[in-house]
Amino acid sequence: MTPAIASSLGSVLPWLDLFGIAVFAASGALAATARAQTLVTATFFALVTGVGGGSVRDLLIGAPVFWVQDPRVAGVCLSAAIVIWVTPERWWRGAALDWLDAVGLAAYAVFGAAKALAFGVPPLPAAVMGVVTACVGGIIRDVLAGEPSILMRPELYVTAAALASGLFVVLTVLGLPPLAGASLAAAAGFLLRAAAIRWHLRLPAYRGRR
């Protein structure tokens, strides 16, 4: 990790990472419980969703796969699955998880971009790594659950992750202190996703050539 990022974000990045993992793991467990699956299946969904994006990112940037090196990660995913399993289903209905997911999406996108930059990845690919970190776990979850992938939905989801990771990279390149850049970028990504949830914002669909 570069000295600037390490000194400014060293105490914050692990918490961003674990928070994003917990939120995505919960969404994976919910996908399983909504289909009346077993606790084993819910735990598997939680783990795959929680670590999917970060695993692909680490493989692409040549870093040790994070959750294999950190025993806390599997514990967070297991705990999220158990919490979903033992709590009433009505607690997780409505938009509550959508709002938590919006926070996790923005935080995880920034974390992924920051880690890529720290491993010497150039700015543009680093921004892409932020999107991969935030979105690939959800794509895997949707495929396993037989749901339309988030990539195939017009809602502003991947776009919000791209805003968070891209803005963080731009602000870092421009010389803004990493902690300030991370805060601004995560806030921007969250606000865009929140607006999409609140007002159902979506990108225009392709309508073909005339």
Image (cartoon, rainbow, N blue to C red):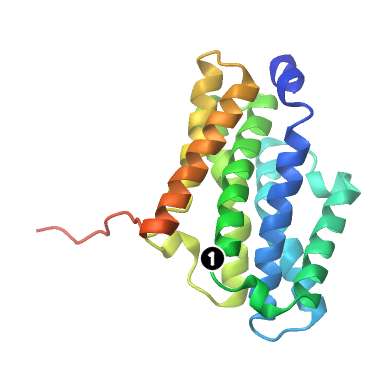
Q: Quadrant of the C terminus?
A: bottom left
Residue 24 lies, in percent from the top left, at 67, 58
| Residue 149 position (above or below residue 179) | below
Q: Residue at x 46, y 38 (%)?
A: 163
Q: Secondary structure at mark 1?
A: loop
Q: Quadrant of residue 66?
A: top right
Q: Quadrant of the N terminus?
A: top right
Seen from this angle, which residue lies furthest top? 175
Q: Which residue is mark 1?
A: 95
Q: Residue at x 71, y 40 (%)?
A: 16
Q: Amino acid at mark 1?
A: Ala
Which residue is nearer to you in this view: 117 or 187? 187
Which residue is nearer to you in this view: 169 or 86? 86
Q: Is residue 91 toward the left or the right of residue 73 in the image? A: left
Residue 114 lies, in percent from the top left, at 64, 30
Q: Is residue 72 toward the left or the right of residue 25 in the image? A: right
